[in-house]
Image (spheres, rainbow, N blue to C red):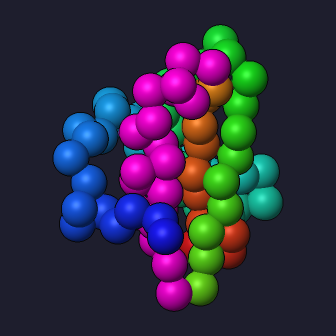
Amino acid sequence: MGSSLANSTRPLPVTDVKTVQSSDGHKIHAEATGDPTKPHAVLLHGLALSGAVFDDFCATPALLENLYIVRRPLLLS
């Protein structure tokens, strides 16, 4: 079974949080963790979930050494 956030002892890494406006006027919220010079992995969440469902995954040291992890809602705000 997967670990739950409540049971996590791993500290969350520093995360950049940004809201930008697309060329058609939609606001796009995204959180990014890791080294932006590394390959990017984009995690989408939506409906009843938030980016917090990826907290443990985004705090995995082996992934952060090799990826820049961006998480954002599937739906535009």
In the current view of this chain or complex, which residue is farthest to the right? 24
Please state if 57 lies on the left or on the right of 69 as rendered: left
Q: Where is residue 25 in the image (x, y as percent from the top left)?
A: 69, 61
Which residue shows up at 49% across the image and 57% down it?
A: 54
Which residue shows up at 54% across the image and 18% down it?
A: 65
Query: Which is nearer the eye, 37 or 21?
Result: 37
Q: Where is residue 12 in the image (x, y as percent from the top left)?
A: 29, 40
The segment highlighted magenta reads 48-66
Q: In the rendered view, would you say 44 is above or below 56?
A: below
Q: Where is residue 53 in the image (x, y as percent from the top left)?
A: 46, 65
Which residue shows up at 40% across the image and 53% down it?
A: 55
Q: In the rendered view, would you say 75 is above or below 16?
A: below
Q: In the rendered view, would you say 27 is above or below 77?
A: above
Query: Which is nearer the eye, 34 or 26?
Result: 34
Number of marks present in the image shown: 0
Please state if 21 lies on the left or on the right of 15 as rendered: right
Q: Can residue 12 be seen in this view?
A: yes
Please state if 47 lies on the left or on the right of 56 as rendered: right
**Is 59 a magenta residue?**
yes
Q: Give the quadrant of the C terminus.
A: bottom right
Chief SS of the magenta region:
helix
Q: Position of residue 60 (x, y in %)?
A: 45, 36
Q: In the rendered view, would you say 41 is above or below 76?
A: above
Q: Can residue 76 be seen in this view?
A: no
Please state if 53 lies on the left or on the right of 63 as rendered: left
In the current view of this chain or complex, which residue is farthest to the top? 37
Which residue shows up at 24% across the image and 38% down it?
A: 11
